[in-house]
Amino acid sequence: MRTTGQRTVSILYIGNLLTRHGLNPTGADTLTERLRQDFTVFTASSVRNQIGRMLDMLRSILLYRGRVSVVLIDTYSTKSFNYAFACGMLCRLLRIPYIPVLRGGNLPARLQRSPRMSRMLFKAAAINVSPSSYLKEVFEREGYKVACIPNSIDIGDYPYRNRSAVSPKLLYVRAYQKIYNPVLAVQVLDEVSARHREARLCMVGPDKDGSLELVRREISRLGLANRVMLHGKLSKKEWIALSDEYDFFINTTNYDNMPVSVMEAMALGMVVISTNVGGVPALIDHLKNGILVEPNDAQGFVDWICRVIEEPELARHLSAAAREKALSFDWSAVRPQWSRVITNAMAKEVNA
């Protein structure tokens, strides 16, 4: 546990901590537990109502202002950006160093849409932390100070199986949500099954915005009910066990940053095929440790899936290289980066 003199260093982590309401764990859920190895960590908020959650976040900053040295603030590009802005401004007023953790894959658009709010939030931060080099580069071009610290995993949680010979068994692990384009996964299966009758798709995740119903309608329209297994939210342990039955991991999203689910699939040795969006190219090196296709390009997914099936050596290479890449995201490698950034932030002077 890190200390200053005889005092244990305490931090407050602000984020959407909603797993108790049946939602998937976020980066905040995972990171707060890991940071407790070195710091005393207070958190906010698990309130489900959006307005109530923002008020609870602000209340927590006031409550812990004399006890914490740094506030970490998860920062997204949509409505949650307003939470981050309000929390950052309160930290400025109270002269508490704060660190925005850049989670939103569409934050570059937010920088352009809300330039004044962005400057107020990101310029006054002790440092901004990006999980991807993609967002780091975007923010640095706008003149903001950014440290790149990748999302982390515990590599021992992910049993590796090299996919040296693959079958058309596809796995999707993401929320059913419009920005992640889950309907595309069903369309990909439809095209693959025209070439490989044994093709199957398994989808895992909570329904965030009604997209699960759209997925069901597409399955019905295409007559794929016998080929698709739909799950709601599963625990990490459950879906990892399930993954051993599948060879391809497909990430169909339209926006992304540094998706932990993709990192986890790479750690398992799955052949990962993802849309070429946001920070994903910093994670997947095309044809070296995974495959990138353009957004909404069902045919691109299909062509690459079929090619990898036909080329076992390519499958073996992608699987092994994916695991090798995932090793760099193990918490043992990421932990000292966070300790250094938080310790340095404590010394920053805050201008109200």
Image (tube, rainbow, N blue to C red):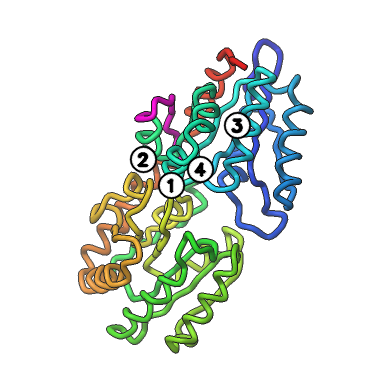
Residue 311 appears at what percent x and percent y? 20, 69
Which class describes the residues within 10 Å of circle 3: few (<14), some (14-19), or many (20+)?
Answer: many
Position of 236 relative to 332 (above/below): below
Q: Residue at x 27, y 84 (%)?
A: 195
Q: Amino acid at mark 1?
A: Asn
Tell me the residue that label 3 is attached to. 72
* 85 horizontally vs 332: left or right: right
**Distance in Å between CA atoms under marks 2 and 1:** 8 Å
Residue 257 bears which disc, if any?
Answer: 1
SS for dot 2: helix
Q: Work out whether residue 77 or residue 97 is closer to the camera in this orientation and state it.
A: 77
**Distance in Å between CA atoms under marks 4 and 1:** 7 Å
Q: Amino acid at mark 3?
A: Leu
Tell me the residue that label 2 is attached to. 134
Residue 88 appears at what percent x and percent y? 61, 29
Q: Are marks 2 and 3 in contact (CB under 8 Å)?
A: no
Q: Quadrant of the N terminus?
A: top right
Q: Work out whether residue 64 or residue 142 is closer to the camera in this orientation and state it.
A: 142
SS for dot 4: loop
Residue 180 bears which disc, if any?
Answer: none
Q: Quadrant of the C terminus?
A: top right
Residues rendered magenta in the picture: 140-150
Looking at marks 2 and 1 on the same chain, the residue that comes earlier in the sequence is marked by 2
Which class describes the residues within 10 Å of circle 1: few (<14), some (14-19), or many (20+)?
Answer: many
Q: Residue at x 55, y 14 (%)?
A: 348
Q: Amino acid at mark 2?
A: Tyr
Q: Are marks 4 and 1 in contact (CB under 8 Å)?
A: yes
